[in-house]
Image: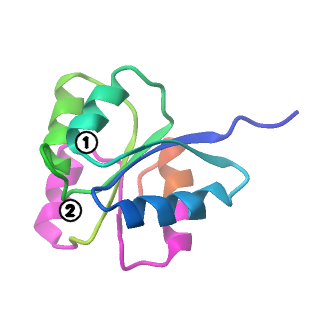
Amino acid sequence: MMKKKISVMLADDNKYVLDSISSFIQEEEDLEVVSKVESGKKVIEIIEKGDFDIVILDLSMPEINGFEVLKHLKVKNIKTPVLIFTNFNEQNQIITIKRLGASGYVCKAESPNKLISAIRTVASGGVYF
């Protein structure tokens, strides 16, 4: 019997990043991108209706940024783990996203395999910082 795939929502305002990361993730047998969104507002709309194992979220987003999305999820008590995937790598921002409830963080400059490893760790209830 095949194990259920880890369902992923990808959120990034750059369509090129969305598409390339999505196709990289789809190559993994145990991962499946079920939603791709380009704004924080869309993340909030969809996550309240959908069922995802993990959200991969950029901090720099139009309308509602990643920090605001994290705050919203915390207030609404939405337990879907969030992995921050961003260009920012300042220590104070990492502290802030931890405080806001993110389960992990990967800088976009890291190797794609780090992202895959982080997805698996965070989706299974672990933390990745």
Task: State left or right for residue 57 relative to residue 26.
Answer: left
Task: State left or right for residue 88 relative to residue 81.
Answer: left
Residue 14 in percent (x, y) is at: 31, 62
Looking at the rendered image, the quarter that the C terminus falls into is bottom left
Residue 69 in percent (x, y) is at: 20, 40
- The residue furthest front is 15
Residue 31 in percent (x, y) is at: 63, 49
Whether 100 is drawn above or below 118: the answer is above
Residue 86 in percent (x, y) is at: 29, 65
Give the SS element for disc 2.
helix
The mark that comes first in sequence, 2 or 1, is 2
Q: Residue at x 40, y 65 (%)?
A: 17
Task: State left or right for residue 27 relative to residue 2.
Answer: left
Three-letter code, disc 2: Ile
Residue located beneath label 2 in the image = 94
Viewer-proximal residue, 18 or 120? 18
Q: Residue at x 68, y 60 (%)?
A: 27
Three-letter code, disc 1: Gly
Viewer-proximal residue, 50 or 37? 37
Viewer-proximal residue, 22 or 53? 22
Q: Quadrant of residue 79?
A: top left
Give the SS element for disc 1.
loop
Q: Which residues are magenta?
A: 89-117
Residue located beneath label 1 in the image = 101
Q: Residues within 10 Å of mark 1 (few under 14, many from 20)?
A: some
Q: Which mark is residue 33?
A: none
**Magenta-colored stretch includes residue 116:** yes
Q: Residues within 10 Å of mark 2 (few under 14, many from 20)?
A: some
Q: CA distance from mark 2 to mark 1?
A: 11 Å
Q: Residue at x 88, y 33 (%)?
A: 1
Q: Residue at x 26, y 23 (%)?
A: 77
